[in-house]
Amino acid sequence: MAAQSQYEQLARQLSAIGAVKRGLARVLPNDCPPGSIAVLNLLDLHGEMRMSRMAELLAVDMSVTSRHVAHVADRGWLDRSPDPSDRRSRILRLTPEGKLLLTELSERYVRALGHYMENWSDEEVDQLISLLGRLREDFGDCRSIPSRLTDEPAPAPSDPPTARTSL
Amino acid sequence: MAAQSQYEQLARQLSAIGAVKRGLARVLPNDCPPGSIAVLNLLDLHGEMRMSRMAELLAVDMSVTSRHVAHVADRGWLDRSPDPSDRRSRILRLTPEGKLLLTELSERYVRALGHYMENWSDEEVDQLISLLGRLREDFGDCRSIPSRLTDEPAPAPSDPPTARTSL
DNA sequence: TATTGTTATACTCTATAACTATA
DNA sequence: TATAGTTATAGAGTATAACAATA
């Protein structure tokens, strides 16, 4: 468990990292927005899956997933076939064209990151990859807020509010 | 200089980290969107500055900065006074109300991060803070794309395109 | 004429709610 | 009735372009 000021700093760094994401996004082709790439990457990484699973991995609403996936499917980068065992569902699969696109995009990312991170060592990049991966994992499917995070700031843990009577 | 597959992995982690940012944003009050907090944080960190400097630090267009700042100023969290030495400019200053808001938001962030990152050690959090800070620094003012990132994937560096005639 | 900042417009990402089709 | 997915609508973030005021 880390100290308060560390969390404050981390929150600021996470806020600032948006600029890095935008900087990277600028090297992408026009009809391939970041949302599309996220879908393709997850499909490449985890293999075929249903819409609901994709929504969970993206940690966005199903409606958002549906639009991203439609955009990608319209361009032939993935295939949506009905699940034979439950015809409400659709199975998403990366097409060869989608795989090819990922390869091309990867080149662009590598060039861009190589440009901006020329002074980073292998070990440092690995550390960052590993810490970011763990952070994402710990947040998990964070689409709904744990109720204890929505209430008042800091009820003294040694003396829960429900136990306070007249002090 | 790191290896290609590392950059590919890093690009994926950066894409996935959006979910973390959304998860954190969910604990914020309704009329204080992430853009407002970014403005307030930078003002708190760097002290008073002009719009153009704020735009540079945010690495967004001036038009975007103008809207974020207007939103924050409308709520009394910062003060925009004309620069006496150049009346085209405005000097941004954090108000006491803005400072107070930052304190309250900080509590929320700390609670949320404490919830999600309960298994992280001080050292690990520090490492992540430090690596993210360095990454943001290395991207700097990345609002315009270096031209070498917009061209074709990988012209052999030993034989620049302009030198090729009939090979 | 160039620069600082604002406003109008358009596009992407996201969430909520209403809807369709299937279980 | 409940669930998987789609679509309509609305709000936030961003960029480009046209504009105003000042240098």
Image (tube, coloured by chain):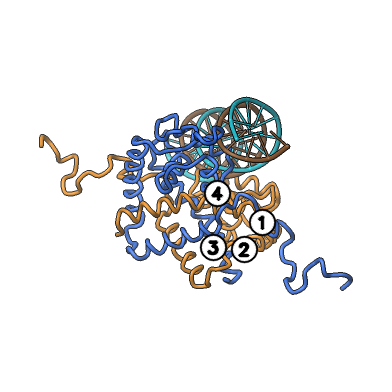
Chain colours: A blue, B orange, C cyan, D brown
Q: Quadrant of residue A76?
A: top left
Q: Amino acid at mark 1?
A: Pro
* Subunit ID for the residue under disc 2: B
Outermost right residue: A166
Callout in the foreground (4, 2): 2
Q: For this rendering, which residue is in front, B154 or B65?
A: B154
Q: Nearer the viewer, mark 2 or mark 3?
A: 2
Q: Is residue B142 left or right of residue B88?
A: left
Q: Position of residue A13 (x, y in %)?
A: 52, 59
Residue density around tag 4, few if under 14, some if 14–19, many if 20 or more, within 10 Å? some
Q: Label 4, label 2: how many angstroms apart (C-alpha)?
A: 36 Å
Residue identified by numbered label 4: B51
Residue beneath disc 1: A146
Q: Nearer the viewer, mark 1 or mark 3?
A: 1
Residue holding disc 2:
B115
| Residue A157 screen position, x and y as percent | 72, 71
* Disc number lying in front (3 or 4): 3
For the residues bearing labels 2 and 1, Cβ distance under 8 angstroms: yes
Cα distance, mark 3 to mark 4? 25 Å
Q: Residue at x 84, y 70 (%)?
A: A164
Q: Are marks 4 and 1 in contact (CB under 8 Å)?
A: no
The answer as to whether the residues below labels 3 and 4 share one chain is no
Q: CA distance from mark 1 to mark 3?
A: 20 Å
| Quadrant including the N terminus of chain B | bottom left
Q: Are marks 4 and 2 in contact (CB under 8 Å)?
A: no
Quick check: can you spot residue B39?
no
Q: Chain of mark 3?
A: A
Say if mark 3 contacts mark 4, CB within 8 Å: no
- Cα distance in 3D space between marks 2 and 3: 14 Å
Q: Which residue is mark 3?
A: A10
